[in-house]
Amino acid sequence: MANIVNFGSSFIVGFILPAVLSVAAYGHYKEYTLYLSFVYIFNIGFNDGIYIKYGGEEPDKINKKTLHEEHNFIRIFQFIIFIPMIIYSIVTRDMVVLLFSVSTLFMTINTYHQNYYQAVGNFKVFSNGNIFKSVFYIFSLLFGVFILKSDQYVLYISLSVLSYILVFLYYEYIFYKTYGFKNEWNLNGKFSLFKIGFIVLFANMSLTFVGNVGNWVVNLGFDIEEFAQYSFQNSILNVLLLIVNAVGMVFYNIISKKENQSMLRLTKRISIFLGILGGLGFFVFKYIIETYLSNYVSALPLLSVTFIAIPYIMVSKILIANLYKARKNERKYFRDSILFAVGSFIIVFSTYLLTHSLLAIAFSTTVSYIIWFLYTTRVEYSYLKSSNKELFLLVSHIAVFYYSAVSFSIPVGFFIYLVYVFLVAIAFKKELTGLVKFTKN
């Protein structure tokens, strides 16, 4: 439910804002959201340490005094980080930096709460927070678009900031209602959380960087209108991946308790099948863009390339990242993720230097995800190695999807790809039957 509501918010941002704002204004809005994708770096790993520390723990067995100490610490620590940011924004008189600074303060504290509730498996509180934020953001965006009829991107950034503040108040209320109010303060053990979390933070940042490396290169190497086109297609992909993140959150708590290799192999197949099925969404998005957002038609070839990466992104986010964290091998996770990020940057940046093509940059990002998939499933977690049948499925998916997406009209392309999905279901009937049985159990 939380992600259905979140989908509505992302749909409005992804489709309505581009229709209201100019291409340049939308580009500036997307610059703000691009910076937001790295907000969590400002907690310097503390929140990630919380995630690792409490993964798989039972909430009623947790030391409340220690929990209060950690809660009070993160609030004071983030306020200290906030002070120089807000001073800089005032000195430079940059409204966007000012709003970004306020977002950073509240988002990092919200992430503390979210990481804790995810780790202990209390997804009700986490989901309610997301629903509350998304509902407010949806109605405030609609108010700005249809009542105020504003074409100022600063307004929509301000509404985003306000939603983070309201969610902060919600999480704080739930925390005090559940655990009471205690003014506990103790630095003991805090730096060990930084030490563990810092490694995981940069590993997570590396994975996020791979998803945004194309955006960064395009933002630095192209004008704002071209950045808007590239960023637009990335936003559409992120709308589809909302459910992926939700499933990934649940799986960390499960994997932390027991690493069942049969279940993990099954999870990998589910991720691949759902990724292939998700390709049907491209044709829906293509219809919406061609019909209502003609200014962004040039983003469609880019979107067709990034959609190829969906099965690999799903496996990475749902399975691989959680396996690294659940094993609590932070240094290995850090090393592999940094190498992945550096390798991806080299691939994407080299592509930019050689071609200066947005399409080639999008394709190089997809190639990076495929390389990461092959490494982690064939080397790091060899029991997840794909069979020849599965590899043939992945190769055929690349060819069939891209051909049907760019070579035909929407109805014909949709029909061709739908037939392919049915053929996949028939060829993997045994596996799909096993998935249904496993789900029932």
Image (cartoon, rainbow, N blue to C red):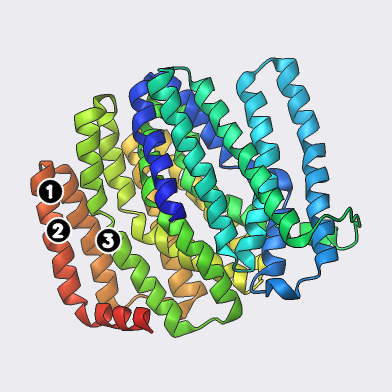
Q: Are the residues flagged by discs 1 and 3 in contact, CB closer than 8 Å?
A: no
Q: Secondary structure at mark 1?
A: helix
Secondary structure of residue under mark 2: helix
- Residue denoted by label 1: 413
Q: Earlier in the sequence, mark 2 or mark 3?
A: 3
Task: Identify the amino acid type marked 2.
Answer: Leu
- Please identify the quadrant where the C terminus is shown: bottom left
Which amino acid does the dot numbered 3 rest on? Ile
Q: Nearer the viewer, residue 70 or 396?
A: 70
Q: Earlier in the sequence, mark 2 or mark 1?
A: 1
Report x, y in % for residue 260: 50, 83
- Label 3, on which residue? 276
Q: Which residue is label 2 attached to?
A: 418
Q: Earlier in the sequence, mark 1 or mark 3?
A: 3
In the picture, the quarter occupied by the N terminus is bottom left
Residue 265 coordinates in the image, percent (x, y): 41, 78
